[in-house]
Amino acid sequence: MLLGAERVFVVDPLEERLRMTRRFVGCDTLQEGTDDVGAALLEATAGRGPDVCIEAVGMESGGGSAVEEAYDRAKQYLRLQTDRPTALRHAIYHCRKGGTVFVLGVFAALADKFPLGAVMNKGLTLRGAQMHGQRYIPMLLERMARGELVTEHLATHVMPLDDGPAATTCSSPRRTAACGRCSCPTAEPS
Amino acid sequence: MKALQWTGVNDLAVNDVPDPTLEDDRDVIVQVRRTVSCGSDLHLLGGYIPFMRSGDVLGHEFLGEVVETGSAVTEHRVGDRVVVSSFVACGQCWYCRQELYSLCDNGNRNPAITEHLWGSAPGGCFGYSHAMGGYEGSHAEYVRVPFADVAPSPCPTTSPTSGPCSPPTPRRPAGWAPTSVVCSPATSSPCGARAASARWRHAPRCSSGPNGSSSSTRWRSGCA
């Protein structure tokens, strides 16, 4: 891949997003809920698991068992936790011993049932960040200008500002599958 | 100007709001050309971040054209096309000097909220609730950009058919027909044509080497 990762897997429940990933990024994909994600990751890494797992979902995560999902949604609804950390739990679970888990999805404050035992006993490194745009945007623009990064396909919807409410909600996976989780509709002041 | 306002949980409206004005001599005003709905806009929309107020303007990923500059701004002129980082950072504090801009000590105008919640406050962010500074967002015709010598990056010149300023390609993947697409003259004209027209009074600056802008960023933030 662009910065030297030997192999990258993208895990997502929506086949449309995975198709976009295969077509425009060219890395491997696994469908949450359909594929056996854990077995596939072990198979690809000589039984160890990925060196690095990047959680990129955030506080409205789904994808766990029905019990896990109901528990997290109920606690969030009752304000007993602000975040549903399902994807983060999966990242910690699947990461290899001594690996690094990166929290990139947006979280607000507190999450319950955090697998601290796995972090400690597997010797994981836990990292997180918002985005240091001033540091990386110039480099990204130069890579785009050189054709190393292609981004046009991410603008799936171009809409005028007057359609702002629809432009915002159409990126919700509940409304349409025709978008990635981020960077979907592009509104233009009319 | 028109702007997309958060008016309540799962409630948005496009309304007329006051035009932004320069509040500091390091500000610029950017006329927004493209603004992107991010997944985190959905968290804000759904009330998962409890520091939104009715009337807040959403939007934090955008590019546009500089239309007004504060007296202390040296890196941008009226007419520059820029991509603006979503995080507001001063460029001079301990964190910014290490290029950890989203951890800026001075970008968040309401640090008390996140200092109480998290122990210390990260930088500010456009359209991202009052916990992150309460800055008006980019889903609007114009937006005020603080610390303008640090945040916006000039768009490099590109070929007419590719690059960060070009409109989205009509070649969308099969099965990805958008539910609603509104094409305006601006979205159907290629970037190169627009760059060559009189609309852009200054050619965008372009760094030649892969590290050009990074060293420029370090220089702007006062780091050797």
Image (cartoon, rainbow, N blue to C red):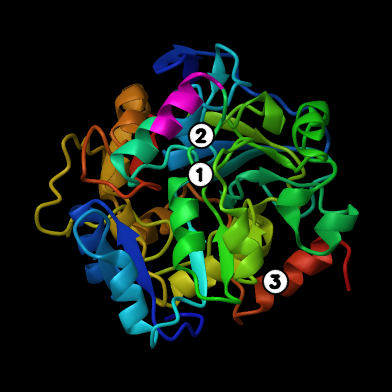
How packed mark 2 is, by other alpha carbons closer than 10 Å (few <14, some 14-19, many 20 or more), is many
Whichever of callouts 3 and 2 sits on the residue coming sooner in the sequence is 2
Viewer-nearest of discs 3 and 2: 2
How packed mark 3 is, by other alpha carbons closer than 10 Å (few <14, some 14-19, many 20 or more), is some
> Helix, strand or loop at disc 2?
loop
Residue B69 picture quarter: top right
Asked whether the viewer can see residue B38, the reply is no
Residue under the point 12% across and 46% down: B177
Identify whether A165 is placed above or below A129. above
> Helix, strand or loop at disc 1?
strand
* Residue A73 colored in magenta in the image: yes
The image position of residue A43, as x and y in percent, is: 31, 82
Viewer-nearest of discs 1 and 2: 2
Which residue is denoted by mark 2 in the rendering?
B59
Whichever of callouts 1 and 3 sits on the residue coming sooner in the sequence is 1
Q: Residue B96 has which mark?
A: none
Looking at the image, which is closer to me, B18 or B173?
Answer: B173
Looking at the image, which is closer to me, B201 or A186?
Answer: A186
Separation of marks 1 and 2 at Cα, in angstroms: 8 Å
The image position of residue A133, as x and y in percent, is: 63, 56
Q: Chain of mark 3?
A: B
Query: The magenta stretch spans which residues?
Result: A71-79
Which residue is denoted by mark 3 in the rendering?
B214
Residue B87 picture quarter: top right
Q: Amino acid at mark 2?
A: Gly
Q: Amino acid at mark 3?
A: Ser
Identify whether A138 is placed above or below B168. below
Which residue is denoted by mark 1 in the rendering?
B62
